[in-house]
Amino acid sequence: DNEFYILVTHAPPYNTACDRIFSGNHIGSKAIRSFIEYTKPTLALCGHVHESRCIDRIDRTIIINPGPLAKGFYSTIDIDGRGNINVNLNTL
């Protein structure tokens, strides 16, 4: 089964590397985290927390915060014919 579900949100899910601010506190959305845990998308793309440029996971869901494009940050996602996913954080 090669079906992929991608969730795109502005806010990151709570208690991940993607929602941690400089102080170390988590400021993400608990509702988005619950939604991810319930629906189990393949990928979850988020932003909002500029200092948390990262790739993380909730169970099998890959969480990606590419960081702000204004600083030249972006992400690429490659999915091959076998369903293997390769995510990279890049800089212009």
Image: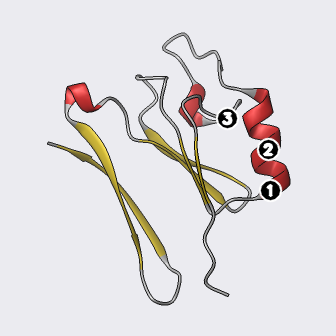
Mark identifier at residue 13: 3
Which quarter of the figure is the C terminus placed in? top left
The reply to whether dot 2 and dot 1 touch (C-beta < 8 Å) is: yes
> Percent position (x, y) of residue 26?
65, 20
The earlier-in-sequence mark between 1 and 3 is: 3
In the picture shown, does residue 80 fall above or below 41?
below
Assign a secondary structure to mark 2. Answer: helix
Q: Does residue 35 appear to the left or right of 20 in the view shown?
A: right
The reply to whether dot 3 and dot 2 touch (C-beta < 8 Å) is: no
Residue at the (60%, 71%) spot, across then down: 4
Q: What's the amino acid at mark 1?
A: Thr
Assign a secondary structure to mark 3. Answer: loop
Between the residue at mark 1 and the residue at mark 3, the CA separation in whole angstroms equals 13 Å
> Percent position (x, y) of residue 66?
39, 40
Q: Which residue is label 1 attached to?
A: 39
For label 1, the crowd category at 10 Å Cα-Cα, with few meaning under 14, some 14 to 19 and many 20 or more, is few
Residue at the (75%, 38%) spot, across then down: 33
Q: What's the amino acid at mark 3?
A: Pro
Q: Does residue 86 appear to the left or right of 56 in the view shown?
A: left
Q: Does residue 45 appear to the left or right of 76 in the view shown?
A: right
In the picture shown, does residue 56 fall above or below 26?
below
Between the residue at mark 3 and the residue at mark 2, the CA separation in whole angstroms equals 9 Å
For label 2, the crowd category at 10 Å Cα-Cα, with few meaning under 14, some 14 to 19 and many 20 or more, is some
In the picture shown, does residue 5 fall above or below 13?
below
> Percent position (x, y) of residue 53?
41, 34
Q: Does residue 74 appear to the left or right of 62 in the view shown?
A: left
Q: What's the amino acid at mark 2?
A: Phe
Q: Which residue is label 2 attached to?
A: 35
The earlier-in-sequence mark between 3 and 2 is: 3
Which quarter of the figure is the N terminus placed in? bottom right
Assign a secondary structure to mark 1. Answer: helix
